[in-house]
Amino acid sequence: MAYVCRALDEIRSTLGDDGTDPSTPLQRLLAAVHNGDEPTMAVCLDEVHNALQAAADALGIYGNVRNFQVLGVQGLEVVYRCPIKRCHGRTSAEVDSEPPLCSVNGQELNRDLLP
């Protein structure tokens, strides 16, 4: 889910999903996130992944997750956590607004320090 949050605008563009049709895989996924419906979220993640691959994004969601590199932490590192606890959030390098906002619901991300 973290990849979807981080790349929501790009995913919308790839799928041609402007957010107006509630029956699209992406809109169903976002609704499940808002409702806290984890079983539906899992099914919808698969549907969005498949839709991305059908739209010529060979990696889809899961390919991008597998390529995620975990970086070593030196000193204190600022991270921004998901306010609704649906993904692991973002590092300070992945934040481009102040205050950083959730791509899914617009709430401010929770700032935290990693020791």
Image: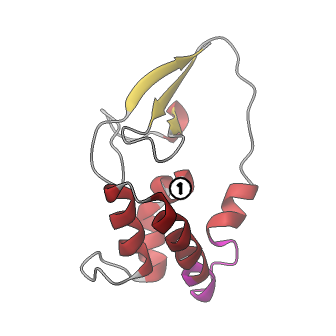
| Residue closest to the eye, 110 or 75 | 110
In the image, residue 71 lies at what x, y percent?
Answer: 73, 33
In the image, residue 26 lies at what x, y percent?
Answer: 42, 73
In the image, residue 110 lies at what x, y percent?
Answer: 38, 29
Q: Quadrant of residue 93?
A: top right
Q: What stretch is highlighted in magenta?
A: 51-60
Residue at point 46% right, 54% down?
5
Identify which amino acid the numbered label 1 is placed on.
Answer: Met
Residue at point 60% right, 88% down?
54
Q: Establish if 88 lies above or below 58.
A: above
Q: Which residue lies furthest to the left in this view?
A: 20
Q: Quadrant of the C terminus?
A: top right
Which color mode does the image show? secondary structure
Residue topped by disc 1? 1
Q: Establish if 53 lies above or below 44.
A: below
Residue at point 38% right, 74% down?
28
In the image, residue 63 lies at what x, y percent?
Answer: 71, 65
Q: Establish if 71 lies above or below 34.
A: above
Report whether 95 appears left or right of 109. Answer: right
- Helix, strand or loop under label 1: loop
